[in-house]
């Protein structure tokens, strides 16, 4: 099903995202490789194209910790493509120490959640133009079981694992809220746990171990490609099957509160599609 579909993968110059780009390119997808800068993104896009024999691979750079660059990325993609069939929000960081983005947000929250919240909104019109239209958020089984809005960005205390776990819960809450908002459209939104995979992020947070990258991309590829899940939305997947996420991820009041706060913090409004920061 993914053959000839246009897929944007954030954080696709390394780790699971890069492996996903290779896998989808081999299936005939037209892949937009996102990386932190243009040089790296274009370099990896060239490698993916050469090694898969797929001529429809492009590289686009943007630092997701800066919302201006998120906006610029969306504008560049909008100027180049007339639709996006699949958006895979894959990029993520794990910070052992608290750092702030240029916009003043805690870096884990900024990159893992807020950037994808804004990018998805900015690309929504392009996604609507696809008759395929899948939004996929790469979360984690390590997602939190509760969301402390008073410590969402480490305002009271910071712990790297807690910050990461909160951001991964945000990914699921965001996908579930999107699924609700888009239920009367043809666009689906789902989230996933890729597995415990041997990546730089795993090393930063847990010190090592994990399975190889080929396992880490499987569920993302399944959600992008499988005809069996056409029309299925608001689900959380692991090992390419729908499973239960933490109870709080299905709490509509928490979904709504995070959504409203994300719009307020980012100065991006979905209903009017306005962006100011």
Image (cartoon, grey):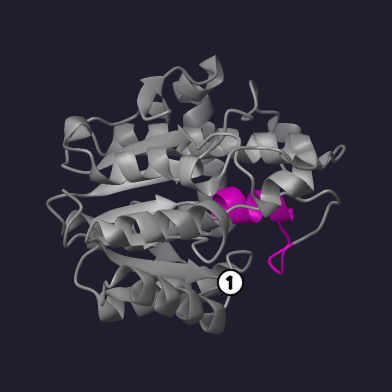
Is any atom of residue 72 visible in this view? no
Q: Whole-percent x and y of residue 59? A: 42, 76
Q: Give the quadrant of residue 21.
A: bottom left
- Residue 24 in the figure: left or right of residue 174: left
Q: How many C-alpha atoms fall within 10 Å of the one at disc 1: few (<14), some, or many (≥20)? A: some
Instruction: Indicate yes or no whether the magenta region holds residue 276.
Output: no
Residue at the image position 24 percent from the left and 45 percent from the top: 225
Is any atom of residue 109 visible in this view? yes
Residue at the image position 45 percent from the left and 66 percent from the top: 275
Residue at the image position 12 percent from the left and 51 percent from the top: 131
Q: Is residue 173 above or below residue 78?
A: above
In the rendered image, which quarter contains the C terminus?
bottom right
Of residues 8 and 46, the one nearer the viewer is 46
Question: Which residue is denoted by mark 1 in the rendering?
Answer: 36
Of residues 48 and 74, the one nearer the viewer is 48
Q: Give the quadrant of residue 209.
A: top right
Instruction: Indicate yes or no whether the magenta region holds residue 113.
Output: yes
Residue at the image position 77 percent from the left and 39 percent from the top: 206
- Residue 2 in the figure: left or right of residue 58: left
Q: Is residue 135 above or below residue 122?
A: above
Of residues 186 and 139, the one nearer the viewer is 139
> Residue pushed farthest left?
131
Q: Whole-percent x and y of residue 144? A: 65, 27
Q: Whole-percent x and y of residue 106? A: 74, 53
Q: Whole-percent x and y of residue 157? A: 87, 38
* Helix, strand or loop for disc 1: loop
Q: Is residue 161 above or below residue 3?
A: above
Total numbered badges shown on the rendered structure? 1
**Range covered by the magenta-colored residues:** 101-114
Q: Is residue 218 above or below residue 255?
A: below
- Residue 172 in the figure: left or right of residue 50: right
């Amino acid at each position: 099903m993914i053959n000839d579909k246009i897929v944007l993968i954030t954080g696709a110059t390394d780790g699971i995202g890069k492996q996903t780009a290779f896998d989808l390119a081999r299936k005939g997808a037209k892949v937009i490789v996102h990386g932190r800068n243009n040089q790296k993104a274009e370099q990896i896009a060239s490698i993916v194209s050469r090694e898969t024999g797929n001529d429809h691979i492009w590289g686009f750079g943007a630092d997701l910790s800066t919302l201006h660059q998120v906006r610029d990325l969306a504008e560049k993609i909008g100027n180049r493509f007339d639709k996006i069939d699949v958006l895979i929000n894959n990029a993520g960081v794990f910070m052992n120490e608290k750092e702030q983005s240029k916009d003043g947000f805690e870096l884990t929250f900024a990159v893992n959640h807020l950037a994808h919240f804004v990018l998805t909104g900015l690309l929504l019109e392009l996604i609507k133009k696809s008759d395929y239209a899948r939004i996929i958020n790469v979360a984690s089984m390590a997602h939190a079981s509760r969301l402390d809005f008073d410590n969402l960005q480490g305002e009271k205390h910071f712990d790297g694992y807690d910050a990461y776990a909160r951001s991964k819960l945000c990914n699921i809450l965001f996908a579930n809220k999107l699924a609700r908002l888009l239920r009367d459209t043809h666009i689906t939104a789902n989230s996933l746990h890729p597995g415990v995979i041997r990546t730089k992020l795993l090393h930063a947070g847990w010190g090592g171990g994990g399975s190889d990258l080929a396992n880490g991309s499987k569920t993302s590829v399944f959600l992008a490609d499988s005809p069996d899940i056409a029309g299925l939305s608001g689900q959380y997947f692991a090992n390419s099957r729908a499973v239960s996420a933490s109870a709080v991820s299905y709490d509509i009041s928490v979904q709504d509160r995070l959504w409203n706060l994300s719009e307020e913090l980012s100065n991006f409004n979905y209903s009017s599609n306005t962006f100011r920061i």
